[in-house]
Image (cartoon, grey):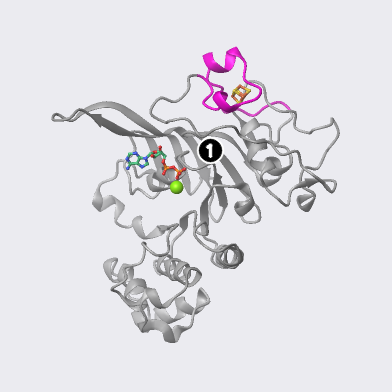
Amino acid sequence: MQPLLELKGLTKYFPVTGGFIFKRQVGNVHAVDGVDLKVGEGETVGLVGESGCGKSTLGRLAARLYEPTFGKVLYRGQDISTASRRELKPIRPEIQMIFQDPYSSLNPRQTVGAIISGPMEINGINPPGGHEKRVRELLETVGLNPEHYNRFPHEFSGGQRQRIGIARALALNPKLIIADEPVSALDVSIQAQVINLLQELQRDLGIAFLFIAHDLAVVRHFSQRVAVMYLGKVVEVGDRESIYLRPRHPYTHALLSAVPEATVEDEPRQRIRLAGDVPSPINPPTGCRFRTRCWKAQERCAEEAPPLIQLAGNREGHLTACHFPEAPTTSGEDVVLDPALA
Ligand SMILES: Nc1ncnc2c1ncn2[C@@H]1O[C@H](COP(=O)(O)OP(=O)(O)O)[C@@H](O)[C@H]1O
Ligand code: SF4
Ligand SMILES: [Mg+2]
């Protein structure tokens, strides 16, 4: 079946300029570098990785807010990375974004009604019963009081503002929502509520999600598939069980070890401390980009970039980019790294 969204060799470089008087390009930020990823109709794909790994850039490329340097973004098989404004017009409403910061992503001078109905008006969508009726319905759908139609964003809490952002995205009946760390700015107690809401919408409305997060805990209950990104590249991807129970890439192991609820038979999982920060994407390490922080790195890792492939013993569609992958289980047998998923 044709995927809803397909990224092929997707690459985004941002120019770095230097010089006092004459700005000239001195390099590139390799924000996203040759990513292949698919999202099926109605599917939820989690995209995780530390800050600076290129997740937001990837999301914006997929939503066609950025133009790629190389590669393609196919939506229902159509290459939208080179599409003209006119060709994009019917597609734009189908792909919506939810942003991390519910404070800056809503216009403070507009009422909630205007914020949610704006995109409908711009796109010439005239729902039966009019815009106001539809906005009230949407407010109800996202768990807000429809009577608050005339209020301004500052009258709402962070979690409520994020719900307004969700209602705005829903106004255009999207087929795909790209949610860029939609709960990272919220209190932990509110995060689960917003995730539950998104999960309900995904189930009830069949919307596909690309759900971006910086840790594996947040996307755990939400994603059917998970892609792990490091310094512009997808280093491991697979269905949820493969990633949480049988991760092969050292970076995935490190990210998983930080998930508090994941334990091996009531013993806390061995915690892997990642030394240092993500290196600069201006001069990414040669070969495997994770090698400067990888405890398994050998000479070959500096010389040869590991391809993203299905390793022996891995399930269909579970791909890993590593020359010396971790064993799929820690002690030979089927060790369940995360009992909640077993
Ligand atoms: N508009 C931009 N211009 C220049 N560099 C950028 C721009 N946007 C992002 N970057 C750089 O690209 C890299 C990836 O950023 P980003 O996609 O925001 O990562 P993430 O969302 O995973 O934190 C970072 O090094 C960031 O500084
Ligand atoms: S390829 Fe080498 S450096 Fe990269 S993750 Fe695998 S073992 Fe570590
Ligand atoms: Mg980001």
Queried whether the magenta region covers residue 144, the answer comes back as no
Residue at 84% x, 30% y is: 332
Q: Could you say whether the residue bearing mark 1 is in a helix, strand or loop?
A: strand
Q: Residues within 10 Å of mark 1 (few under 14, many from 20)?
A: many
Report the span colored magenta.
287-312
Residue 234: x and y in percent read: 53, 35
Image quarter of residue 327: top right
Mark 1 near ligand 1 (CB under 8 Å)? yes
Image quarter of residue 190: bottom right
Residue at 45% x, 40% y is: 52
Residue at 42% x, 66% y is: 165
Nearest the viewer among 191 and 234 is 191
Vertical placement of residue 240 versus 114, above or below: above
Q: Which residue is mark 1?
A: 229
Residue 127: x and y in percent read: 37, 77
Compared across the picture, whether 133 is left or right of 259 comes to: left
Look at label 1 and name its amino acid. Met
Compared across the picture, whether 270 is left or right of 113 comes to: right
